[in-house]
Amino acid sequence: MTRFSPTSLDELRDAVATALAAEEPLELIAGGSKRGLGRPLQVPHTLDLSGLTGVREYQPSELVLTAGAATPLDEIEALLAENGQMLAFEPPDWRALLGAEVTRPTLGGTIACNLAGPRRIKAGAARDHFLGFRGVSGRGEIFKAGGKVVKNVTGYDLCKLMAGSYGTLTALEEVSIKVLPRPEAVATVLFRDVPPTLATGLMAAVLGSPHEVSGAAYLPPGLALPIGVAVRVEGPAPSVASRRDSLVREFGDAGAAETLGDDESIALWRSIGAAGPVSGLDGRTVWRVSVAPSRGAGMAEAVARRIDAAWFLDWGGGLVWLAVPETGDGGAAVIRGAVGGEGHATLIRGGPGLRRGTAVFEPEPAGLAALARRVKDGFDPRHILNPGRMVDGV
């Protein structure tokens, strides 16, 4: 097995060109924290992108940062914090969930998987903050798309295509992202003892209120931390205090209300984004299901009636985390049956055998699958970049 370790754009192109000439696939790795996502690969060579690192341009006043794709997230977040800024899509840290604690998540890996945390309901997904990139396609060609400014129009929005492609279309070398001011204060209101039947309605009402909620989650009984409905507000300190008190006053009848300050709020929402309430359940398969917010609790309860399932909700009920026994198909048939084609169920944690034999991502309709294959063939006609990571044979 050959390990290519480029440290420049030209070296990256040469590495991909070498693999292309031999028609021998590559597994793309940077920090390695997300190597357990998707279908396991069995390829002859590794493309180690960890040398493509470093912040290359940062203009706090322009709200734009450009960095090597393999730049560790913690370095970027530390730099932004020094300037009172942040990655607003709140990239989650799944290392404990995936058993990859010794690795370092990178900017490019986060973008390639399109990962976003609890603030997604307000700030959008990672792709919504992805301004531009430079990389090498599976054709061995250097190309770039987007730009380094927030207002940018350059034709096809290839950033949206690359975000969520899991390294199957392009080896990213450089990434430009939008950053935003960090909130001055954070507060969380907890509504205790809320049953699942009322949780989604409460979160919908809170999110529909004028209080600019930036996080809404439900941790039901049965978890190690059954806190009920959690609602987050952020911003200038006086505004946060006013909105926090208004939430307690207006929705306090839904459940015994209590509040958390900055440090406790930050820790709680970091845990929710990291799937902390279910990540510590050893010997369990973990699924991440996206559905209409009104269906979240009902879908989770339908699964729990069929199989032993621990679950919680994020994104106001639109994101369901499920931990089920790792037996048979890992709950795939029951979970996807409960989704009923009106959402997406993704297998996040499972053994290699399960991830090899079960569709990790929601199976696509024939027409959409054919379109995805044509896109793959356009960027990587010989299928040398992470082949099979998302779909068998692609």
Image (tube, rainbow, N blue to C red):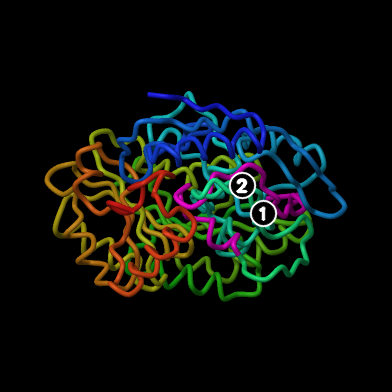
> Of 176 and 327, which appears nearest the observer?
176
Q: Secondary structure at mark 2?
A: strand
**Disc 1 marks which residue?**
144
* In-image side of 223 versus 76 (left or right): left
Disc 2 residue type (three-letter): Gly
Q: Return the residue found at the far right.
A: 61
Up-down: is 151 above or below 262? Answer: below
**Residue at image point 30% right, 35% down:** 42
The quadrant of the picture occupied by the N terminus is top left
Q: Does 104 lie within the magenta span?
A: no
Left or right: 278 in relation to 385: left
Spot occupied by residue 274 in the image (x, y as percentages of width and height): 47, 43
Segment colored magenta: 158-186
Q: Taking 77 as reference, is 345 left or right?
A: left
Q: Nearer the viewer, residue 379 or 265?
A: 379
Query: In which image quadrant can residue 140 be found?
Result: top right
- Whole-percent x and y of residue 29? 48, 34
Count of numbered marks: 2
Q: Is residue 384 left or right of residue 48?
A: left
> What amino acid is labelled 1 in the image?
Lys
Image coordinates of residue 257 in percent, x first then y, are: 52, 57
**Label drawn at residue 135:** 2
Reply yes or no: does residue 173 show up in magenta. Answer: yes
Q: Are marks 2 and 1 in contact (CB under 8 Å)?
A: yes
Query: Residue drawn 55% across and 64% down?
Result: 121
